[in-house]
C-alpha cells in the first residue's frame, strides 16, 4: 500500500516518475538523475523545528495571507482561491488577508505580532515583497512554529528543504523566463521582426529578473529588434503610466512596441498610449491573465498576456500548508520538485483569447478533498534558479 504522501502526489510523484521512466526503457540510464532530483529534504541546521514537527488540530488552524496589493485582479483571484480552500475545510472565517504594498518592512511589521501570538496555530501564505525579505519571513515562521508556503520571490541560494527548520513547506511561482520570452516573441512577431521597443519592468527581484531574462533571450533571436530603453514600473499601474509617458516623451515615434512585465503595468502603459492617441498602434504585453488584460487583447490594444491561474495558486498554497500542518503530507519525504515548483501558465493572444475569456473557473474544484488527491497535477516542473 502506498504511503499517504506518495498517493497525494500521484503519478507525478516519486513512484510515478520512476514508473514512467521504466516503461520508457530509461530506468537504468536515468536512475542517478531521478534519485538526485527526489532526495528527501535536508534539514536546515542541526534538527528540524520541534514546533513544526508536531501535528496541528485542524479545527484550531487559522490562515494568514500576506499579498502584494489588493489593487490587482491577479491577487483578487488568488484570495478567492484561498478562501474557497478554507471554506472547504470549514475554516473560511479563520482566514485573514494583509497587503504589504511591496514594502518589505511593512510585511515584517504586520506578520511579527501575529506569528508571535499564535504561530503554532497559524498557516502563512506569503508573497515576499522581494527576495531580500523571503528568509526573514521564513525565519520568523520557524521561530514561532508556523508552516509557510511562499509565492513568487525567493533568493536563488535558499530553498524549502535547506531553510526554515522544516516549517517552510513549499515555494511556488510561474516560469518568468518562459513568460518574458513568449510575450516578447509575440510582440516582435507583430512588428514583423523589425523595429524598436522599450521595456517597463517590475520591482527588482527574482521575478523581474526572470522575465527580463526571457525578454533578452527573445532579443537574441530577433536581430532586427532594438531595445531602446528599460525602466522600472514596480508592478504598479500608476507608476508604469508615468514611466511610459516619460519613455514616449524621450523616444517619440521611434517606439514601435512596449514590453511590459505584468498586466497591472500594462494597464498603465495603455492609459499613457491612449492619452497620446497611440493605443492599438503601439502594442504592449502583460502577464497574469487578468480579465481586463484579456479584454484588451481581444480589442487589439494588447498583443498578449501570460495567463497565470491565481485561483488555483491560492487554493493550492493553502492546501499544501494545511496538509503539512495536519500530517496529511510529510514534507521531509517529498522530492525537491514537489516543494519548489512552477505552476502551469498559458500565453494568450488574439488566437485563443475568446477561449480564455469563456473559460469559467470551477470554484467547486478548489476543495481540499479534490486538490489533495494529487497535488502534483498542478506542478509544471522544478524551479530553475538563475545565476
Image: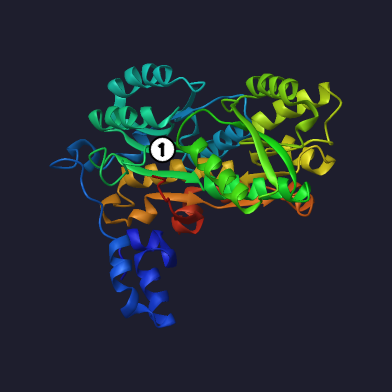
Q: Is residue 170 visible?
A: yes
Q: Quadrant of the N terminus?
A: bottom left
Q: Residue at x 27, y 56 (%)?
A: 333
Q: Residue furthest left?
A: 46
Is 364 placed above or below 108 here?
below
55 and 361: which is toward the camera? 361
Q: Is residue 76 left or right of residue 23?
A: right
Q: Residue furthest right?
A: 277
How would you rate the neighbour count of disc 1 (Cα within 10 Å): few for under 14, some for 14-19, many for 20 or more? many
Q: Residue at x 70, y 25 (%)?
A: 268
Secondary element under disc 1, as helix, strand or loop, is: strand
Q: Which residue is mark 1?
A: 150
Is 106 placed above or below 279 here?
above
251 and 14: which is toward the camera? 251
Residue 194 pos. (x, y %):
75, 47
222 and 358: which is toward the camera? 222
Residue 272 pos. (x, y %):
76, 23
Q: Quadrant of the C terminus?
A: top left
- Image quadrant in which you'd find residue 283: top right
Residue 58 pos. (x, y %):
35, 40
Q: Residue at x 51, y 40 (%)?
A: 314
Q: Is residue 364 visible?
A: no
Q: Residue at x 31, y 39 (%)?
A: 57
Is 14 placed above or below 280 here?
below
- Image quadrant in which you'd find residue 105: top left
Q: Is residue 96 left or right of residue 296?
A: left
Amino acid at each position: 500500500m502506498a504511503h499517504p504522501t506518495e498517493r497525494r502526489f500521484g503519478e507525478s510523484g516519486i513512484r510515478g516518475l520512476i514508473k514512467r521512466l521504466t516503461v520508457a526503457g530509461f530506468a537504468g540510464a536515468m536512475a542517478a538523475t531521478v534519485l538526485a532530483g527526489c532526495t528527501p529534504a535536508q534539514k536546515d541546521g542541526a534538527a528540524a523545528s520541534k514546533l513544526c514537527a508536531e501535528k496541528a488540530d485542524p479545527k484550531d488552524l487559522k490562515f494568514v495571507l500576506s499579498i502584494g496589493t489588493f489593487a490587482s485582479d491577479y491577487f483578487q483571484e488568488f484570495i478567492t482561491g484561498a478562501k474557497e480552500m478554507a471554506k472547504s475545510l470549514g475554516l473560511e472565517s479563520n482566514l485573514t488577508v494583509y497587503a504589504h504594498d511591496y514594502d518589505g518592512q511593512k510585511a515584517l511589521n504586520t506578520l511579527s505580532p501575529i506569528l508571535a501570538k499564535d504561530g503554532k496555530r497559524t498557516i502563512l501564505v506569503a508573497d515576499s515583497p522581494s527576495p531580500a525579505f523571503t528568509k526573514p519571513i521564513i525565519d520568523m515562521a520557524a521561530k514561532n512554529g508556523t508552516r509557510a508556503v511562499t509565492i513568487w520571490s525567493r533568493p536563488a541560494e535558499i530553498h524549502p528543504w535547506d531553510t526554515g527548520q522544516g516549517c517552510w513547506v513549499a515555494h511556488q511561482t510561474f516560469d518568468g523566463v518562459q513568460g518574458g520570452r513568449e510575450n516578447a516573441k509575440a510582440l516582435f512577431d507583430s512588428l514583423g521582426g523589425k523595429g524598436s521597443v522599450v521595456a517597463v519592468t517590475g520591482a527588482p527581484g527574482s521575478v523581474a529578473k526572470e522575465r527580463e531574462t526571457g525578454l533578452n533571450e527573445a532579443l537574441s533571436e530577433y536581430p532586427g529588434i532594438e531595445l531602446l530603453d528599460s525602466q522600472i514600473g514596480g508592478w504598479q499601474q500608476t507608476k508604469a503610466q508615468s514611466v511610459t509617458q516619460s519613455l514616449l516623451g524621450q523616444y517619440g515615434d521611434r517606439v514601435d512596441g512596449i514590453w511590459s512585465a505584468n498586466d497591472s503595468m500594462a494597464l498603465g502603459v495603455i492609459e499613457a498610449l491612449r492619452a497620446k492617441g497611440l493605443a492599438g498602434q503601439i502594442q504592449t504585453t502583460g502577464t497574469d491573465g487578468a480579465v481586463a488584460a484579456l479584454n484588451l487583447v481581444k480589442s487589439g490594444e494588447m498583443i498578449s498576456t501570460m495567463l497565470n491561474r491565481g485561483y488555483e495558486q491560492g487554493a493550492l498554497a493553502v492546501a499544501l500548508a494545511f496538509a503539512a500542518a495536519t500530517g496529511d503530507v510529510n514534507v521531509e519525504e517529498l522530492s525537491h520538485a514537489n516543494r519548489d515548483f512552477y505552476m502551469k501558465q498559458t500565453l494568450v493572444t488574439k488566437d485563443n483569447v475568446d477561449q480564455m475569456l469563456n473559460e469559467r473557473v470551477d470554484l467547486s474544484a478548489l476543495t481540499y478533498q479534490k486538490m489533495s488527491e494529487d497535488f502534483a497535477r498542478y506542478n509544471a516542473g522544478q524551479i530553475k534558479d538563475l545565476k
